[in-house]
């Protein structure tokens, strides 16, 4: 065997931290493993990458097989490749996170989707492999990114109230003292990226709040002009 | 061959964008390839990862073999894994960038180090493999990171003037209109992370400027108290 051939004995996988928001908690979608290794443990959805498949394509495939969703927010975070991270051999995994609207999610017919369940991020315990470390790394990236880019809206329904938006940021950033309501509203409205829909909530027991939508076209136009989102 | 075995036919490498600063330009260290593929082309220093080697360890090894330097700033950026990116087979590469003081660099005896040369980042043309894409990605990360963390000091000598510091930021961020001197000095001094050494430059033809050092201990203490660097 040539020297170079001895290096071609590894595999690589993608693992996907799929975030959702249910109005109260930030959640992630986990799979209960049906087979060894780590049988019965909760794990991130992921798969080995096919020899002729690009990394992003593999991550999109895992997401679609599990959730039926395509064209959702997906971002590569980094590679995890500790020597002993996988019992089957040398397997490097490339971690992704995606943001979906929880209401768009329905259980797909894929066999591994049957064992999927949403878990509150702050109640996740041990996970299979090094998946807890991967989750922590993706969560850290999300916390930073959500302040620098308006990606949080990917987790909300198309029409939302300012209270819902604030709850979303609180669930992600988890600041010890919460977020000051007045400052938050002032800051987010001053971006001019929210359209007031001139509608209010329906079917709520409290005083119905105004509904807004995120103006993605306007954001993209502003970015082209050099604008940076910062909240 | 079992289904799983068919996946264990890939290799992975690390590639390292080594940044340096010569007082004027932001530079990177490139290697001229001595053998096919891409013989004669400039490339990022990198290597295949050994079967029993962690990713960070491999990146540190490449850096040390080339520069003789250890314990320098090193950060993983992301994985690049397009199906056809390497002519020898499926090879995923994990991109790193590191920051070194150019004056600490001397050519090491390693054979591939003989062909190494510093290039101005903004004059780099085509590179071997997908290395130009990797460079662009690492440069983008450096531009963002240098504003969020005081890592720029890794590129400067231990004692520096405020003008040198500003030139460093200008060479990395390359703002179209430059950086306003008065604002920059006010902002950087207000961090209280620079110690005035009560010394001035020696051997310069112009009026010698005051010398400063970065107070890393103080920075780490502030971070522990919740401080975020932002310049």
Image (spheres, coloured by chain):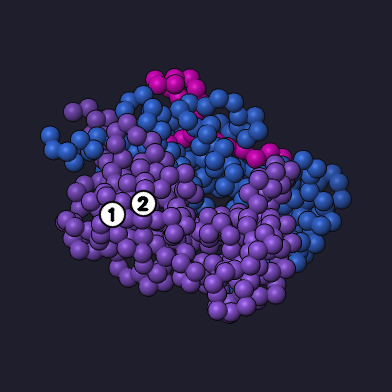
Chain colours: A blue, B purple
**Is residue A18 visible in this depiction of the protein?**
no
Q: Distance of mark 1 from mark 2, alpha carbons?
A: 8 Å
Numbered mark located on residue B113 in the image: 1
| Residue lying at 46% horizontally and 67% vertically, measured from the top left | B22
- SS for callout 2: helix
Q: Are marks 1 and 2 in contact (CB under 8 Å)?
A: yes
Tell whether A137 sits left or right of A178: left
Q: Outermost residue, front direction?
A: B203
x then y, percent, for residue B37: 18, 56
In x, y percent, where is residue A189? 76, 64
In x, y percent, where is residue A79? Answer: 43, 42
Foreground pick, B149 / A120: B149
Left or right: where does residue B227 sit relative to residue B96?
A: right
Above or below — where is A106 with respect to B191?
A: above
Q: Where's the N terminus of chain B, which quadrant?
A: top left
- Residue A46 belongs to magenta span: yes
The residue sitting at the right extreme is A207
Chain letter of mark 1 equals: B
Q: Quadrant of the C terminus of chain B?
A: bottom right
Q: Is residue A186 at all visible to an observer of this figure? A: yes
Report the span colored magenta.
A23-48
Q: Which residue is mark 2?
A: B67
Q: Position of residue A135 (x, y in %)?
A: 54, 37
What residue appears at the point 66 percent right and 75 percent down from the top-left corner? B181
Task: Out of B220 and A115, give the one closest to the viewer.
Answer: B220
**Chain letter, disc 2 residue:** B
Position of residue B88 in the picture relative to residue B125 (left or right): left
Q: SS at mark 1?
A: helix
| Crowd class of label 1 (few under 14; some 14 to 19; many from 20; radius 10 Å) | many
């Amino acid at each position: 065997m040539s020297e170079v051939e001895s290096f071609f004995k590894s595999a690589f996988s993608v693992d996907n931290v799929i975030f959702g928001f249910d109005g109260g908690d930030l959640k992630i979608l986990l799979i209960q493993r049906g087979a060894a290794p780590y049988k019965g443990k909760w794990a991130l959805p992921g798969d080995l990458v096919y020899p002729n498949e690009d990394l992003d394509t593999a991550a999109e495939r895992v997401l679609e097989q599990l959730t039926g969703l395509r064209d959702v927010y997906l971002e590569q975070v980094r590679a995890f490749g500790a020597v002993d991270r996988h019992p089957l051999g040398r397997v490097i995994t490339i971690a992704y996170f995606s943001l979906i609207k929880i209401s768009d999610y329905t259980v797909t017919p894929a066999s591994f989707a049957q064992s999927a369940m949403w878990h509150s991020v702050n109640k996740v315990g041990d996970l299979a492999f090094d998946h807890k470390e991967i989750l922590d790394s993706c969560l850290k990236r999300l916390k930073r990114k959500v302040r620098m880019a308006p990606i949080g809206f990917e987790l909300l329904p198309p029409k939302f109230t300012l209270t819902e938006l604030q709850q979303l940021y609180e669930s992600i950033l988890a600041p010890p003292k919460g977020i000051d309501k007045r400052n938050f509203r002032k800051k987010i409205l001053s971006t001019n990226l929210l359209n007031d829909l001139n509608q209010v909530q329906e079917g709520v027991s409290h005083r119905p709040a105004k509904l807004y939508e995120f103006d993605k076209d306007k954001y993209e136009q502003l970015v082209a002009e050099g604008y940076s989102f910062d909240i």
